[in-house]
Amino acid sequence: MTASLQTVNIPGVRPRGPRSSSPPVRRGVGRPLGYAAAVIVIIAMLAPVAFIVIGGFRSNSEITTDPVGWPSVWNIGNYIDVLTGGIFWREVLNSTIAGVATTAGVVVLGLMASYVLARYRFRGRGALYAVFAAGLMFPMTVAITPLYILVKNLGLMNSLGGVILPQIAFALPTTIIILVPFLRAIPDEIQEAAFIDGCSRLGFFWRMVVPLAMPGVITVGILAFIASWNSYLLPLFILNNEATFTLPLGVQAFSSQYSVDTAKVLAFTSLSMIPALLFFAFFERRIVGGLTGAVKG
Protein backbone atom coordinates (compact mmCIF):
# COMPACT_ATOMS: atom_id res chain seq x y z
CA MET A 1 0.00 0.00 0.00
CA THR A 2 1.52 3.28 -1.09
CA ALA A 3 0.83 6.50 0.74
CA SER A 4 1.17 9.72 -1.17
CA LEU A 5 2.06 13.01 0.47
CA GLN A 6 -0.16 15.87 -0.50
CA THR A 7 0.57 19.51 0.03
CA VAL A 8 -2.06 21.23 2.10
CA ASN A 9 -2.63 24.81 1.07
CA ILE A 10 -3.57 27.03 4.02
CA PRO A 11 -4.93 30.45 3.18
CA GLY A 12 -2.48 33.27 4.05
CA VAL A 13 0.49 30.93 4.48
CA ARG A 14 3.10 30.48 1.74
CA PRO A 15 4.36 26.94 1.30
CA ARG A 16 8.01 26.46 2.19
CA GLY A 17 10.36 24.62 -0.06
CA PRO A 18 13.18 22.38 1.06
CA ARG A 19 15.66 24.10 3.38
CA SER A 20 19.14 24.64 2.07
CA SER A 21 21.99 23.43 4.24
CA SER A 22 24.20 26.40 3.40
CA PRO A 23 23.33 30.00 4.30
CA PRO A 24 22.73 32.42 1.46
CA VAL A 25 25.80 34.21 0.19
CA ARG A 26 25.58 37.96 0.41
CA ARG A 27 27.67 39.75 -2.11
CA GLY A 28 28.33 43.39 -1.46
CA VAL A 29 30.87 46.10 -1.94
CA GLY A 30 31.86 46.39 1.72
CA ARG A 31 34.81 44.00 1.59
CA PRO A 32 36.42 45.40 -1.62
CA LEU A 33 36.07 48.93 -0.24
CA GLY A 34 37.72 47.82 3.00
CA TYR A 35 40.65 46.30 1.13
CA ALA A 36 41.00 49.44 -1.00
CA ALA A 37 41.01 51.66 2.08
CA ALA A 38 43.62 49.44 3.75
CA VAL A 39 45.85 49.60 0.67
CA ILE A 40 45.57 53.39 0.57
CA VAL A 41 46.50 53.67 4.25
CA ILE A 42 49.48 51.31 3.81
CA ILE A 43 50.74 53.27 0.81
CA ALA A 44 50.38 56.56 2.70
CA MET A 45 52.37 55.15 5.62
CA LEU A 46 55.12 53.52 3.55
CA ALA A 47 55.61 56.36 1.06
CA PRO A 48 57.75 58.53 3.39
CA VAL A 49 59.85 55.51 4.40
CA ALA A 50 60.39 54.57 0.74
CA PHE A 51 61.33 58.17 -0.07
CA ILE A 52 64.00 58.19 2.65
CA VAL A 53 65.44 54.78 1.74
CA ILE A 54 65.54 55.46 -2.01
CA GLY A 55 66.90 58.96 -1.44
CA GLY A 56 69.96 57.46 0.23
CA PHE A 57 70.89 55.81 -3.07
CA ARG A 58 70.76 59.09 -5.00
CA SER A 59 73.15 62.00 -5.37
CA ASN A 60 72.57 65.50 -4.09
CA SER A 61 72.20 66.86 -7.61
CA GLU A 62 69.48 64.35 -8.41
CA ILE A 63 67.60 65.18 -5.22
CA THR A 64 67.80 68.89 -6.01
CA THR A 65 66.63 68.40 -9.59
CA ASP A 66 63.90 65.81 -8.91
CA PRO A 67 63.21 65.25 -5.19
CA VAL A 68 60.83 62.29 -5.69
CA GLY A 69 62.45 60.58 -8.67
CA TRP A 70 64.28 57.29 -8.96
CA PRO A 71 68.09 57.26 -8.93
CA SER A 72 69.67 57.12 -12.36
CA VAL A 73 72.47 55.02 -10.87
CA TRP A 74 71.98 53.19 -7.56
CA ASN A 75 74.86 54.55 -5.49
CA ILE A 76 75.60 52.72 -2.24
CA GLY A 77 78.41 55.07 -1.32
CA ASN A 78 76.25 57.07 1.08
CA TYR A 79 75.33 53.97 3.06
CA ILE A 80 78.92 52.74 3.08
CA ASP A 81 80.15 56.09 4.41
CA VAL A 82 77.63 55.94 7.26
CA LEU A 83 78.36 52.31 8.13
CA THR A 84 82.13 52.74 8.07
CA GLY A 85 81.99 55.82 10.28
CA GLY A 86 82.20 55.51 14.03
CA ILE A 87 79.32 57.87 14.82
CA PHE A 88 76.52 55.55 13.70
CA TRP A 89 77.72 52.47 15.59
CA ARG A 90 78.45 54.45 18.76
CA GLU A 91 74.90 55.77 18.78
CA VAL A 92 73.52 52.31 18.04
CA LEU A 93 75.43 51.01 21.07
CA ASN A 94 74.08 53.79 23.28
CA SER A 95 70.51 53.14 22.12
CA THR A 96 70.96 49.41 22.70
CA ILE A 97 72.27 49.94 26.23
CA ALA A 98 69.42 52.31 27.06
CA GLY A 99 66.83 50.00 25.50
CA VAL A 100 68.04 46.81 27.19
CA ALA A 101 68.41 48.46 30.61
CA THR A 102 64.99 50.11 30.32
CA THR A 103 63.38 46.84 29.27
CA ALA A 104 64.97 44.91 32.14
CA GLY A 105 63.89 47.49 34.70
CA VAL A 106 60.35 47.71 33.35
CA VAL A 107 59.89 43.93 33.25
CA VAL A 108 61.32 43.23 36.71
CA LEU A 109 59.67 46.09 38.58
CA GLY A 110 56.41 45.86 36.64
CA LEU A 111 56.10 42.12 37.16
CA MET A 112 56.70 42.36 40.90
CA ALA A 113 54.27 45.26 41.35
CA SER A 114 51.64 43.55 39.19
CA TYR A 115 51.99 40.33 41.20
CA VAL A 116 51.24 42.15 44.45
CA LEU A 117 48.29 44.04 42.97
CA ALA A 118 46.82 40.94 41.34
CA ARG A 119 47.36 38.21 43.94
CA TYR A 120 47.30 39.97 47.32
CA ARG A 121 44.38 41.61 49.08
CA PHE A 122 45.20 44.61 51.22
CA ARG A 123 43.69 47.94 52.10
CA GLY A 124 44.23 50.53 49.40
CA ARG A 125 44.91 48.04 46.61
CA GLY A 126 42.27 49.59 44.35
CA ALA A 127 43.53 53.09 45.01
CA LEU A 128 47.11 52.04 44.27
CA TYR A 129 46.04 50.43 41.00
CA ALA A 130 44.12 53.61 40.14
CA VAL A 131 47.27 55.65 40.71
CA PHE A 132 49.18 53.52 38.20
CA ALA A 133 46.28 53.75 35.75
CA ALA A 134 46.24 57.54 36.15
CA GLY A 135 49.89 57.56 35.11
CA LEU A 136 48.75 56.83 31.57
CA MET A 137 47.20 60.31 31.41
CA PHE A 138 50.48 62.14 32.06
CA PRO A 139 52.88 61.93 29.10
CA MET A 140 56.56 62.69 29.45
CA THR A 141 56.09 65.97 27.63
CA VAL A 142 54.15 67.39 30.58
CA ALA A 143 56.80 66.39 33.13
CA ILE A 144 59.91 67.16 31.12
CA THR A 145 60.85 70.26 33.15
CA PRO A 146 60.55 68.59 36.60
CA LEU A 147 62.39 65.58 35.19
CA TYR A 148 65.22 67.79 34.00
CA ILE A 149 65.55 69.39 37.44
CA LEU A 150 65.40 66.02 39.20
CA VAL A 151 67.99 64.40 36.94
CA LYS A 152 70.26 67.42 37.32
CA ASN A 153 70.01 67.28 41.12
CA LEU A 154 70.84 63.57 41.05
CA GLY A 155 73.97 64.26 39.01
CA LEU A 156 72.88 62.12 36.06
CA MET A 157 73.14 64.74 33.32
CA ASN A 158 74.96 63.61 30.15
CA SER A 159 74.68 59.97 31.18
CA LEU A 160 72.51 57.13 29.97
CA GLY A 161 71.31 56.58 33.54
CA GLY A 162 69.52 59.92 33.40
CA VAL A 163 67.56 58.61 30.42
CA ILE A 164 66.98 55.05 31.61
CA LEU A 165 65.44 55.79 35.02
CA PRO A 166 62.69 58.17 33.76
CA GLN A 167 61.90 55.80 30.89
CA ILE A 168 61.37 52.97 33.37
CA ALA A 169 59.12 55.15 35.53
CA PHE A 170 56.92 56.27 32.62
CA ALA A 171 56.66 52.74 31.20
CA LEU A 172 55.48 51.15 34.47
CA PRO A 173 51.80 52.24 34.21
CA THR A 174 51.34 50.55 30.83
CA THR A 175 53.23 47.50 32.06
CA ILE A 176 51.07 47.10 35.16
CA ILE A 177 47.83 47.61 33.24
CA ILE A 178 48.83 44.79 30.87
CA LEU A 179 50.28 42.34 33.40
CA VAL A 180 47.67 42.53 36.17
CA PRO A 181 44.96 40.72 34.11
CA PHE A 182 47.46 37.96 33.26
CA LEU A 183 48.30 37.37 36.91
CA ARG A 184 44.69 37.55 38.05
CA ALA A 185 43.75 34.88 35.51
CA ILE A 186 46.03 32.32 37.21
CA PRO A 187 43.71 29.93 39.10
CA ASP A 188 43.91 29.93 42.89
CA GLU A 189 43.96 26.13 42.82
CA ILE A 190 47.44 26.21 41.30
CA GLN A 191 48.69 28.42 44.09
CA GLU A 192 47.09 26.23 46.76
CA ALA A 193 48.56 23.08 45.22
CA ALA A 194 52.01 24.69 45.12
CA PHE A 195 51.79 25.68 48.78
CA ILE A 196 50.69 22.16 49.73
CA ASP A 197 53.76 20.77 47.94
CA GLY A 198 55.95 22.99 50.08
CA CYS A 199 56.56 25.79 47.59
CA SER A 200 57.20 29.20 49.13
CA ARG A 201 55.63 32.42 47.91
CA LEU A 202 58.83 33.44 46.19
CA GLY A 203 59.20 29.98 44.67
CA PHE A 204 55.63 30.09 43.40
CA PHE A 205 56.37 33.46 41.84
CA TRP A 206 59.44 32.26 39.92
CA ARG A 207 58.28 28.73 39.08
CA MET A 208 54.62 29.31 38.26
CA VAL A 209 53.74 32.99 37.88
CA VAL A 210 56.57 34.03 35.61
CA PRO A 211 56.16 31.15 33.09
CA LEU A 212 52.36 31.54 32.98
CA ALA A 213 52.61 35.31 32.47
CA MET A 214 55.34 35.05 29.84
CA PRO A 215 53.16 36.27 26.91
CA GLY A 216 52.41 39.46 28.80
CA VAL A 217 56.02 39.81 29.93
CA ILE A 218 57.25 39.55 26.34
CA THR A 219 54.67 42.10 25.20
CA VAL A 220 55.59 44.74 27.78
CA GLY A 221 59.28 44.09 27.15
CA ILE A 222 58.89 44.69 23.42
CA LEU A 223 56.84 47.84 23.97
CA ALA A 224 59.39 49.20 26.46
CA PHE A 225 62.33 48.49 24.14
CA ILE A 226 60.69 50.12 21.11
CA ALA A 227 59.65 53.17 23.14
CA SER A 228 63.18 53.55 24.47
CA TRP A 229 64.73 53.08 21.04
CA ASN A 230 62.51 55.78 19.50
CA SER A 231 62.72 58.19 22.45
CA TYR A 232 63.83 61.67 21.40
CA LEU A 233 62.49 64.33 23.78
CA LEU A 234 64.06 63.02 26.99
CA PRO A 235 67.57 62.45 25.51
CA LEU A 236 67.34 65.91 23.93
CA PHE A 237 67.06 67.49 27.38
CA ILE A 238 69.38 65.16 29.30
CA LEU A 239 72.21 64.42 26.86
CA ASN A 240 74.44 67.25 25.68
CA ASN A 241 77.61 65.27 25.02
CA GLU A 242 77.83 63.66 21.57
CA ALA A 243 79.54 60.61 23.07
CA THR A 244 76.30 59.74 24.89
CA PHE A 245 73.85 60.50 22.06
CA THR A 246 71.25 57.85 21.29
CA LEU A 247 70.26 57.13 17.71
CA PRO A 248 67.21 59.43 17.38
CA LEU A 249 69.20 62.31 18.84
CA GLY A 250 72.14 61.39 16.63
CA VAL A 251 69.96 61.63 13.52
CA GLN A 252 69.09 65.20 14.40
CA ALA A 253 72.74 66.07 15.11
CA PHE A 254 73.91 64.37 11.91
CA SER A 255 71.32 66.20 9.79
CA SER A 256 72.46 69.51 11.26
CA GLN A 257 76.13 68.73 10.72
CA TYR A 258 75.70 67.47 7.15
CA SER A 259 72.77 69.67 6.14
CA VAL A 260 74.32 70.28 2.72
CA ASP A 261 74.76 66.54 2.01
CA THR A 262 71.07 65.58 1.81
CA ALA A 263 71.71 62.12 0.35
CA LYS A 264 73.98 61.11 3.23
CA VAL A 265 71.44 62.42 5.76
CA LEU A 266 68.74 60.29 4.14
CA ALA A 267 71.06 57.26 4.24
CA PHE A 268 71.78 57.82 7.94
CA THR A 269 68.07 58.24 8.69
CA SER A 270 67.08 55.08 6.81
CA LEU A 271 69.75 53.02 8.57
CA SER A 272 68.55 54.30 11.94
CA MET A 273 65.03 53.08 11.17
CA ILE A 274 66.01 49.54 10.23
CA PRO A 275 66.63 48.10 13.75
CA ALA A 276 63.28 49.26 15.12
CA LEU A 277 61.40 48.09 12.00
CA LEU A 278 63.01 44.64 12.09
CA PHE A 279 62.45 44.31 15.84
CA PHE A 280 58.78 45.21 15.51
CA ALA A 281 58.30 42.97 12.45
CA PHE A 282 59.73 39.91 14.21
CA PHE A 283 57.73 40.38 17.42
CA GLU A 284 54.47 41.76 16.02
CA ARG A 285 52.54 38.58 16.79
CA ARG A 286 53.91 38.55 20.32
CA ILE A 287 52.60 42.06 20.91
CA VAL A 288 49.14 41.27 19.53
CA GLY A 289 48.94 37.98 21.44
CA GLY A 290 49.97 39.61 24.71
CA LEU A 291 47.48 42.45 24.39
CA THR A 292 44.71 39.99 23.47
CA GLY A 293 45.44 37.94 26.57
CA ALA A 294 45.37 41.06 28.71
CA VAL A 295 41.95 42.02 27.35
CA LYS A 296 40.53 38.53 27.89
CA GLY A 297 41.93 38.38 31.40
Image (cartoon, rainbow, N blue to C red):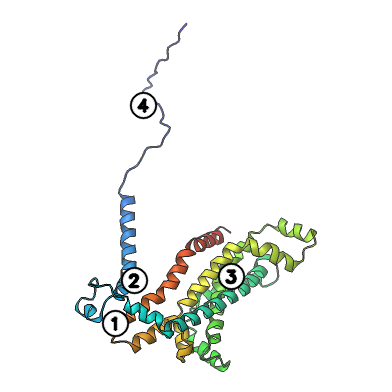
Residue indicated by mark 3: 176
Distance in Å between CA atoms under marks 1 and 4: 76 Å
**Where residue 10 sits in the image (x, y, percent)?**
38, 21
Towards the viewer: 71 or 50:
71
Distance in Å between CA atoms under marks 2 and 4: 62 Å
Farthest-out residue, left: 65
The quadrant of the picture occupied by the C terminus is: bottom right
Element under disc 2: helix
Q: Which comes before the other along the chain, label 2 or label 3?
A: 2
Towards the viewer: 49 or 271:
271
**Where residue 235 sits in the image (x, y, percent)?**
47, 85
Q: Left or right of 163: which side holds 85?
A: left
Q: Which comes before the other along the chain, label 2 or label 4?
A: 4
Towards the viewer: 30 or 76:
76
Residue 49, label in figure: 2
Q: Residue at x 73, y 69 (%)?
A: 202
Q: Amino acid at mark 2?
A: Val
